[in-house]
Amino acid sequence: MTPRKQQSTSRLQPTPAVAWPIRVAMVLLFVGLLLACAAAWVVPIEVFQQWALDRAGTGEFAKFEAIGEAEFSVWLVRIVSLSLLIVGSILWRDLARWVAFVNAAWTGLMQVTRTDDDGAAQAHTSMMQRLRTVGIRAFLCSWAVLFVAHTVHAIGLRIHDWPYFRFNSGEVVLPNMSVSNKAVIRYLQQTTPPHARILVASDQKLFFLSYYLRPRTLLHQMHPGSEHVIPLKDQERKLEAYRLSDLSAEDLSRMNHDFTLEYFEHPSMVDAKQVLDDSAWIAFIRGREQNPNLIPNYLVRLRPAGAHQP
Amino acid sequence: MMSLLILLVGLIGQWLFGLLMASCVLRRKDQPEPTLSELAGLGFAWGVGIPAWLLFVCSFCGMPLGLLPSALIAGIGYIGGGLLLRSRWRCSRVAQPYDVGQASIDRNDVALCRACQILIACLMISTSLQVLQTPQKLWDERAIFALKAKVLFEEHSIRSPILLDPDFVQYHPRYPLLLPLAEQNIYAFLGQVDDRWSKLIFPALYCGLALSTSGVLSRTMSPGRAWLAALLMATVPVMLPYEYGFLCGQADAPVACFHGLSMLYLWDGLQRLRRGEAHAAPFLVAGICGGLTAFTKDEGIAYLMIQVAIMGLFTICAIRRMPDLRRVLTGSVAYVVPAAIAIVPWMIHRRSLPTTTEMNYFERMTLSLFVSRLETLLWSVPHLFHRMFWEWREWGLQWWMMVAAFAIRPQRSLQRSQLLFLFDVTAALMSLLVAGMLAPAQLDEHIGGSSHRFLMQIAPVTVLFAATLFTRANPPIETGVSMTQK
């Protein structure tokens, strides 16, 4: 008999009845899912959001996060529970076959994790081989548990991400950067034409600015002392940088530009007398922060090319 | 909505293009058909890598980047790959999977296959959804790759004066362009920059690695075992769901994919040599994947050098046995030539790029520097072992699996095809230590902040080492899960 025929005849064999504990477990699972699905779809999202808000911490963004996370979680439960109900219904129609499938897959797993099945068939297995087999199975079990734990953690992270990203592109969100970086990006987007070439003197790593400000071109002569230095949060580490006055006429002419920007954040690089120099910037940041008396603690000074030269 | 539809059509076309390329390299008249999972897997990986490389060559020759070349590649994919898939589909209706010439495959093994396939499919869907949920948000993915992708999309050329300007604000200007070009390719279909959609290439590479693993391994082990190995490959936590793995736009996971595939096919080639079969195809695939690794990130050059050295060593070992020597030599040439073709244009173009923020390892390599920095090993060696074995909760059990597999099968671990993995891992770890000695950066920040990502790049090799130790002693080559055998 060919293997194909063997397979088709095995399909024709009557499938054994499903044991009652499995049926009961399936029914309980189904009822539980139905209740969760109904609750998630019938109860308004605002109820869950209010519940989360009441339990939010006192952090700066805690309430914002709680509302967004509750929204995402409810939608996740709605979609997952509905999908599981549909899948469960399909399984239920042919439960005996699916149980047989799971049993076969389990047996298959037991077979392929035996260490004594390669080469010629052996009449008996040694204690060492049995130990190896048990070891492999225990290892695979640990592997699976670890992966499930990581997956649960990842789902938690995605829930946490939702309030901030909400299917928006990076251009909209400006993720994972300092508040000052974001403000400078928005300011330059507002005040410079799209294809402007901007020469920057700064003690900041400007890669994110360069990325989000495209098609503007950012030019910056990096100080060799800060080329391979990783910046730390809140200016904990000073990055060596050239001031605009340090650049020679040759440098300035080489870096053909339409605007110059001075952007310094480290206290030792900021002259308090200069922070209010750029009136457009001050108006912008005060409007952004909704504080008409704000005096920023970092220097941003944007000027058209040549304006900084005496 | 229309642009998303164009993107979807374009991406399917490029997957078919990758599948066509894989089929062209792997199909031989005197050989059984490669499995569909192998072709589909390579199609995913090559559907990202080869179009990016072709776009690079086109732009290198002066052709502007944009929708036209991307659509052309997709068009070829639809015509060639579509016809190929159609013919295989017809064949598959004649012969069902697992049922021909595979008396050893029982229903339990088929059920295990199906279970693993279902789990891998769920993982792929979940990965794609997670990837699309967040835009590019990490340091390297934006500062190095996404920024270049934006410039390439806007300037339509790899020779853009902006990328050649040493004062333009970009990180690692000399990093290879596979990812920027692959992202640019997506923007070309989309018609605009959106750094969520450009992340779609990463789940494709993840699928490519998992599916190819099952496809290749099913040639030498039962399909159940092969798919279990693929499932293990797909569930290494450091590659997924860790944020710096396949869920983000950084280059470490793509390097893991291409390097893993390269090692997988080198192993396959060596296995065939061991059985006295002379086939260049696996070495060709390994060479192309090796070249794509070097075109993804600079570490790829080190991996390429390691693989060339290993093949050279095997050639020297075979020098006394003439028929063996001829086969190993053929394999080595078949590996080196496509790898060289893949990286030579890039190496030529690279010389015109600025060196700002580059570490210049090769230029800094002097004996005096080595000697003066020897004490860094006192920190970096324990750090590396700590990362590999002690921090398994964060990065996964793959290193323990490698050690356990060695302990269970010590003799088989020392066969030539298995030594390939051991040499590769050892040499890769040594390169990281050397990089730590040479880098002009603070050691604990440089190595400490990146060693987990480097170890991710070789994680597939550890899984392959363990999985391939459980092949049959004398496997028949026809035991693969074929969709077309008659």
Image (cartoon, coloured by chain):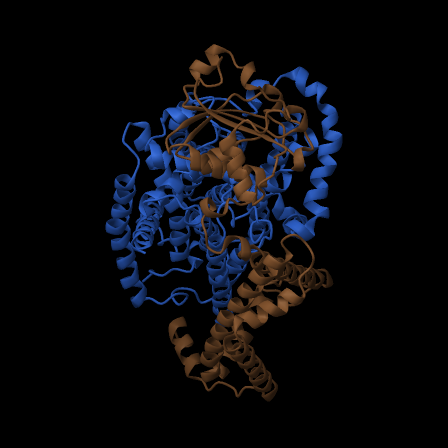
Identify which residue, A236 or B419, lies in the foreground. A236
> Is residue B417 visible from the viewing direction of this image?
no
Residue at 55% over, 78% down = A39
Q: Relative to residue B205, is residue B380 drawn left or right?
A: right
The N terminus of chain B - image quarter = bottom left
Identify which residue, A95 or A299, lies in the foreground. A299
Q: Is residue B479 above or below residue A39?
A: above
Residue at 68% over, 48% down = B403
> Is residue A76 visible from the viewing direction of this image?
yes
The answer to which image quadrant residue A195 occupies is top left
Whole-percent x, y for residue B359 in the image: 57, 25
Q: Is residue B425 above or below residue A274?
A: below
Residue at 67% over, 65% down = A55
Whole-percent x, y for residue B222 in the image: 50, 61
Identify which residue, A14 or B343, lies in the foreground. B343
Q: Relative to residue A264, is residue B204 drawn left or right?
A: left
Q: Is residue B328 above or below residue B260?
A: above
The C terminus of chain B - image quarter = bottom left
Q: How many marks?
A: 0
According to the colouring, which chain is brown? A
Q: Drawn colour of chain B? A: blue
Q: Relative to residue A304, is residue A111 drawn left or right?
A: right
Whole-percent x, y for residue B332 in the image: 45, 33
Whole-percent x, y for residue B73 in the image: 28, 43
Residue at 62% over, 59% down = A63
Q: Is residue B352 above or below residue B445?
A: above
